[in-house]
Image: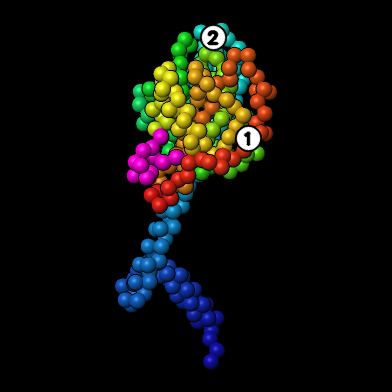
Amino acid sequence: MGMSKNAQKAYEKALKEKKKKRRGHWLIIQKEDSFKEKCSKLFTQFCCLVVIACVIVLGREVYLSLSAQYLNFSLKNLYDSLTGETASEELTEGARHLLSMNPDTIGYIRIDDTPVDFPVVQASDNDKYLKTAFDGSSNKAGTVFLDFRNVLTAKKRSDNLVVYGHNQRDRTMFGSLKDYKNSLEHYSAHPYITFNSNYRSDKYLIFAYFVTEVEPSQTADGVIFDYHNYIDLSDREVYERFIANINERTQIITPVDVKYGDEFLTLSTCSGEFEPSRFVIFARKLRKGESLDDIDTSAAYLNPDARPIDWSRV
């Protein structure tokens, strides 16, 4: 049976309204919905909330990562543009500007051609910069910092400078140090660290690195190597114990020799093999009259006698 034009229009309008009404029902619970439909919509709503929460969390992670990268990049460019030679008791121009931005600035660390290239700070404790960026903003990437017990001034410095940084997945902070773990080629290409105090620049030759336990329960004898507590090495027995522990654990044997009276730099970050664990890199300062060209880093090799991790305890 045919319909008049007005009836046809009314029918089509009714269909559109019906479809429109149905489209709004896929999420919003209506009185006329059956129990099954209500359960389905509740589940859909829950899934939507989960997706929204994940997007928010992921967005924040990306934002914090990009913020940390941009800040490091900006600080690097600023420092490079201002760095110059100065007298040993005068602030370098780069340090002067960084100190004006953050009075906790203690130096600047760099491993050429790697993401490690940023300022180092020092606070009155080792907690402040775990989740605080160089500019004072909150960021889980934190800032690379010197142990609060270390001394680093124009006239005096600790025998072993211990520097901490987060092992970031985006490779900011100390996230790229893991490249040393399984690659002698990486070591050979990046065998030294430049660490500038606020007053002068020094080169440190990497001579050892390894993954180590943190808790006594992770070792068979209940003893761990508390490398971060070896700051004053003026006592020969303490120095020898420090080096013996390193030699026992190091993953590589390098041509870099060490002796009593040397100054050291220790880089410490979390490691992913087990929880908790640390990856630690040890370097000694270039001696007076010594050149980087004096060391044949290609002669390094894996240590077959390195103390193994007790995997049954970690």
Front tag of 1 and 2 = 1
* Residue at image coords 65%, 19%: 291
Q: CA distance from mark 1 to mark 2?
A: 34 Å
The residue where tag 1 is placed is 300
* Residue at image coords 35%, 23%: 124
Q: Which residues are magenta?
A: 210-225
The picture places residue 314, in percent across and down from the top left corner, at 40, 48
| Above or below 185: residue 11 | below
Task: Indicate which disc, 1 or 2, sits on the residue closer to the N terminus.
Answer: 2
Q: Secondary structure at mark 2?
A: loop
Q: Residues within 10 Å of mark 2 (few under 14, many from 20)?
A: few
Query: Is residue 124 rendered to the left or right of residue 201?
Result: left
* Residue at image coords 65%, 39%: 185
The picture places residue 202, in percent across and down from the top left corner, at 57, 19
| Above or below 214: residue 46 | below
Amino acid under disc 2: Ser
The residue where tag 2 is placed is 88
Please identify the quarter of the rendering in which residue 181 is found: top right
